[in-house]
């Protein structure tokens, strides 16, 4: 089975959760003997493959799904639908699409119509959690029979991480808050910085900062309690060690789907403060995860304080180790491919 994996053109110019998800998915599939590869549509033909797996339904990716279907190829899409796509938002988006269409003689399409086209041209849609599944069904009118829930996995190295390397690098053993994400207003590090400024806690940031976000980073670094490590490779031993050494991991983004970084922190035994705008299934995580409004500094501060008093829970790590493995993810996606190929 040959599988063409694609996403939008500029994705791999930076490093983040989606990039890691794609790389780990391909590796898990290849370990099962599936010939999955990230292809270059400028030099490789879709028709040389048995199936197309598309990651993300935005940034023009609907055209990939449309072309694949035109060529008679089955399409599996991992769309990463944000939680704001509710049933009500879908109704408003369809109304707006109608107004824009009539005004422009149907020459302009909204983002909603592009996402819908991507989903409707897919033979199977993979949601990362039940919340995302409901968004796909309710906002875009996709049949529930076509939507499967397959979560992200967690590499084994995060379960076995030691804090020693991070403690040595930071040259201090005092507690710190960790944030791993691209540095930008959407990931909301400045709000987190302000939230803990009066607590005496240190904040350690890890992530790429693009040149046009440099001024945002400078505002953050104006606070003395912040240490910016910069970009780390996903398999860097220091990254896993930082997760293990942190007292709390905090990701107060404006919105997330199923952030790998939050799962990685939990795998390392570190409790998590997470934006309330997400699609993760928190069942089984107990008190190890607290949700916060992303722009409420007091709520972020209170959640961090509560987790500091509480500490870790080994049962959550054990549950994660059984459920969120890339081997299990690869097996589920493989079954999805087989089912799709059997009915097309």
Image: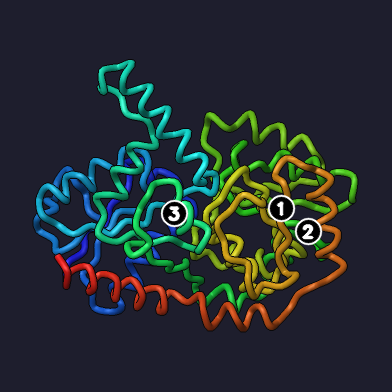
Q: Give left or right: position of 297 versus 286.
A: right
Mark 3 or mark 2, which has the lower sequence index? 3
Residue that badge 1 annotates? 204
Q: Nearer the viewer, mark 3 or mark 2?
A: 3
Q: Tag 2's secondary structure?
A: strand
Q: How is the image coloured?
A: rainbow
Q: Tag 1's secondary structure?
A: strand
Seen at 70% across and 44% down, the residue is 294
From mark 1 to mark 2, how far is it between C-alphas? Answer: 7 Å
CB-based contact (under 8 Å), mark 1 and mark 2: yes
Q: Give left or right: position of 238 versus 148.
A: right
The percent position of residue 233, horizontal first and vertical second, equals: 49, 58
Q: Nearer the viewer, residue 344 or 261?
A: 344
Mark 3 or mark 1, which has the lower sequence index? 3
Seen at 42% across and 27% down, the residue is 96
Residue that badge 3 annotates? 18
- Specify the quadrant of the image occupied by residue 180: bottom right
């Amino acid at each position: 089975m040959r599988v063409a994996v694609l996403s939008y053109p500029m994705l791999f110019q930076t490093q983040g959760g989606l990039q890691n998800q794609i790389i780990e998915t391909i590796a898990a599939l290849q370990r099962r003997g599936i010939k999955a590869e990230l292809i270059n549509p400028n030099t490789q033909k879709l028709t040389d493959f048995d199936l197309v797996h598309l990651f993300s339904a935005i940034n023009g990716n609907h055209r990939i799904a449309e072309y694949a279907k035109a060529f008679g190829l089955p399409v599996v899409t991992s769309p990463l639908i944000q939680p704001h796509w509710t049933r009500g938002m879908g109704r408003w988006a369809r109304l707006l699409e109608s107004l824009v269409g009539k005004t422009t003689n149907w020459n302009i399409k909204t983002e909603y119509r592009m996402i819908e086209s991507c989903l409707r041209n897919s033979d199977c849609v993979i949601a990362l959690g039940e919340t995302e599944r409901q968004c796909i069904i309710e906002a875009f009118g996709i049949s529930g029979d076509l939507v499967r829930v397959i979560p992200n996995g967690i590499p084994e190295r995060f379960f076995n991480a030691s804090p020693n390397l991070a403690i040595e690098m930071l040259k201090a053993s005092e507690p710190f808050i960790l944030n791993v994400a691209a540095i930008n207003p959407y990931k909301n590090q400045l709000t987190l910085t302000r939230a803990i400024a009066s607590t005496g806690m240190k904040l350690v940031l890890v992530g790429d900062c693009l040149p046009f976000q440099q001024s945002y980073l400078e505002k953050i670094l104006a606070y003395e309690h912040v240490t910016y490590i910069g970009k780390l490779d996903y398999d860097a031993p220091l990254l896993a060690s930082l997760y293990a050494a942190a007292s709390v991991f905090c990701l107060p983004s404006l919105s997330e789907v199923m952030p790998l970084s939050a799962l990685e922190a939990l795998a390392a035994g570190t409790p998590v403060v997470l934006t309330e705008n997400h699609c993760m299934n928190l069942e089984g995580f107990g008190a190890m995860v607290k949700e916060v409004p992303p722009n409420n500094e007091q709520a972020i501060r209170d959640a961090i304080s509560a987790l500091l008093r509480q500490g870790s829970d080994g049962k959550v790590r054990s549950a994660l180790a059984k459920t969120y493995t890339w081997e299990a993810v690869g097996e589920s996606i493989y079954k999805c491919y087989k089912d799709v190929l059997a009915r097309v």
